[in-house]
Image (cartoon, helix red, strand yellow):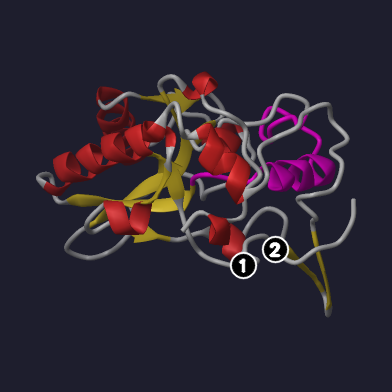
Amino acid sequence: MKITNWILLALGTIGFVIDVSAQYDYGLTPINTREAYEASLIDNPNARLKDLAQEIEGIQLDIKYSTSENFTGKVIYREPRAFLRQEAASALAAVQKQLKKKGYGLKIFDAYRPYSVTIIFYELYLDTAYVASPYTGSRHNRGAAVDLTLFDLKTGVELDMGTPFDEFTEQSSPLLQDLPEEIMKNRTLLRSVMEKNGFSIYPTEWWHFDFKGWEEYDILDVPFDQLD
């Protein structure tokens, strides 16, 4: 791929970035300009991506891919931001309100993910049980998936979910039952409130939830700074 200036990968002292205008090698042609993105919203204005920090009161962002604290060990995003399609963002706001009554809040690790990032992940880690195939694109690329956890509103401490975000092991599966009681309780709370509001769990990752109708949204490769 060619070089441009919006997704930074820090490789020691060397940085390179992915060109969203480059020809894609996996058979998909995602929407990759602001103009094309805006045109796609003409018939469906509710598909607009919304900034979760602005849309949801009290939500916390811990965008791992804007740091090197992720499975790649590289900085992927220039900005620690999170976006979802409008319907999904509204549903997540409802989740936040319901959790607040129980003394908890949402912490977001990732949401909309440009398609070029999916290519990076796939080429670094070829196991499609944990990273999406660029031949199909991901639910994140459609702005209809979110990675998150819960935190205690009083202490600010994350609830123990058994494994950290992006630990690609069997222990991360939300289907696993042989776990300590506290971890099972925390995972069940997160899953139940998300499912109540139109999200479904991903079978290998307790933190990953897809919004209903995700397949109806276009695959995007639009940089965060073009979504404002």
Residue 12: x and y in percent read: 82, 75
Tell whether 88 sits left or right of 176: left
Q: CA distance from mark 2 to mark 1?
A: 7 Å
Q: Residue at x 14, y 51 (%)?
A: 103
State the residue position of label 2.
6
Dot 1 alpha-carbon crowd within 10 angstroms: few under 14, some 14 to 19, many 20 or more: some
Q: Of discs 2 and 1, which sits in the foreground? A: 2
Amino acid under disc 1: Arg
Specify the label residue 39 is tagged with.
none
Tell whether 210 sits left or right of 15: left
Amino acid under disc 2: Trp
Mark 2 or 1, nearer chain start: 2
Residue 159: x and y in percent read: 33, 51
Residue 220 drawn in magenta: no
Tell whether 29 sits left or right of 54: right
Q: Residue at x 46, y 40 (%)?
A: 146
User: Picture quarter containing residue 98?
Assistant: top left
Q: Is residue 167 visible?
A: no
Q: Residue at x 68, y 30 (%)?
A: 137
Q: Residue at x 54, y 33 (%)?
A: 40
SS class of the residue under badge 2? loop
Dot 2 alpha-carbon crowd within 10 angstroms: few under 14, some 14 to 19, many 20 or more: some
- For the residue pair 102 and 36, the one nearer the viewer reads as 36
Q: Is residue 11 visible?
A: yes
State the residue position of label 1.
78
Q: Which residues are magenta?
A: 111-134
User: Picture quarter containing residue 138?
Assistant: top right
Residue 50's place in the image compared with 206, above or below, is below
Tell whether 67 sits left or right of 194: right
SS class of the residue under badge 1? loop
- For the residue pair 202 and 139, the one nearer the viewer reads as 139
